[in-house]
Image (tube, rainbow, N blue to C red):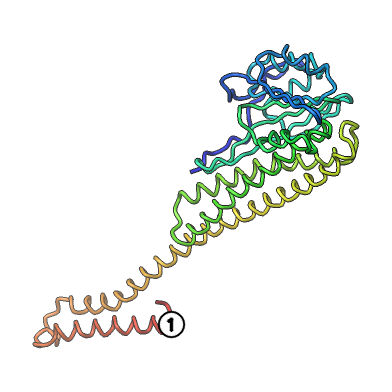
Amino acid sequence: MLRPRRLFRRQKTPGTAPGTLIHSGERKAESVRMTIIDYDEHDLTERTVEDVEQCVPYHQTDTVTWINVDGLHNVAIPEALGKQYGIHPLVLEDVLSTNQRPKIEDYEDSLYLVVRMITYNDTQEQIEDEQFSLILGSNFVLTFQEKPGDVFGAVRKRLQNPKGRLRTYGPDYLAYALLDALVDHYFFALDGIGEQIVTIEQNLMDNPDADDLETIHNHKREMIFLRRAIWPLREVIAQITRGESPLFRETSQVFLRDVYDHTIQVVDTVESYRDMLSGLLDLYLSTLSNRMNEIMKVLTIIATIFIPLTFLAGIYGMNFAYMPELQWRWGYPAVLGIMLLVAGGLLVFFRKKRWL
């Protein structure tokens, strides 16, 4: 059974000065982990570091550096990375505020993107999400996640191939590859929800119950959340493909247009699922109504049959002394026979009318 999702999360304290670094989301990681992947077309270095100072040597090279941070509760790490790479304090503030909607902000020497990383939990049969922040610079990509584990396993594997585009293209292509992996996993999440919708529809046709109604409402909440996460992403990618930022070269914008097409497909799928869930809700109410109509029909038929029988029983239940049938030897079985004939005649009449 799905767990209801909170559509709105508490913001930080009102009146806080802009650029104040406060982690305002849920703590989803026990400790902060930083991973560095530094590469060019000849060499690749991958390591996990514990201190931001260990990232300094990679900032002073001509290679492409990808620094990924898992866990946001330790404010000192994003703050130190921001000072080292010259990141604006407002960007770091948004990184630590995990209720951001997808957006893009251009700071001339860097580009900041916020998207929602969405996965599908097969065990709990619900989608899970976290905020994913990406900062693109001239020779680096900084990514921030709320917890360990992501959807970029295929991207890391592609980096192992020295002849692939990821190793020969710049950091903008790496940013594209990460966005592409995020959007592709939206389809996996939607596939899981689609299977649930098919199951619910079958249950509604067979034997609807209150659990199905709760599941439908929870899925509708999921669709509302997905719509809020994906619709702005479409505009983010569209802004990049318009070539307004020099950090994304034309060679990468060609691939980003493909990501834009995939985003449109995801949006269409979400809208289709919303319509299907609304239809399932109507189907649930219609099925219950039909079931109630069937019950009322059976009760009405039973009552209709017993009305003339009750009339006959009432007639012969009167205590008049001179009723002619009272002294007749076959009066009792004759009355029972008449009752059976009346009931049988009514049943035949109902069947001819196709009420049964």
Image quadrant where one finds the C terminus: bottom left
Instruction: Between residue 262 and residue 50, name the one nearer to us.
Output: 50
Quarter of the rendering containing residue 349? bottom left
Q: Residue at x 58, y 25 (%)?
A: 28
On screen, residue 105 versus residue 340, left or right, reads right
Residue 254 % position (x, y): 85, 44
Residue 20 can be seen in this image: no
Instruction: Between residue 63 and residue 249, name the one nearer to us.
Output: 63
Q: Is residue 101 above or below residue 310?
A: above
Residue placed furthest toward the top: 53
Instruction: Between residue 155 and residue 73, name the one nearer to us.
Output: 155
Q: Residue at x 64, y 55 (%)?
A: 275
Quarter of the rendering containing residue 221? top right
Residue 263 % position (x, y): 75, 46
Residue 95 % position (x, y): 72, 24
Instruction: Between residue 220 and residue 121, name the one nearer to us.
Output: 121
Quarter of the rendering containing residue 225? top right
Residue 272 % position (x, y): 67, 54
In this figure, which residue is indicated by the disc labeled 1?
353
On screen, residue 65 versus residue 156, left or right, reads right
Residue type of the residue flagged with mark 1: Lys
Q: Residue at x 43, y 80 (%)?
A: 354
Residue 315 can be seen in this image: yes
| Within-10-Å neighbours for mark 1: few <14, some 14–19, many 20+ | few
Q: How many marks?
A: 1
On screen, residue 43 versus residue 278, left or right, reads right
Q: Secondary structure at mark 1?
A: loop
Q: Is residue 177 above or below residue 107?
A: below
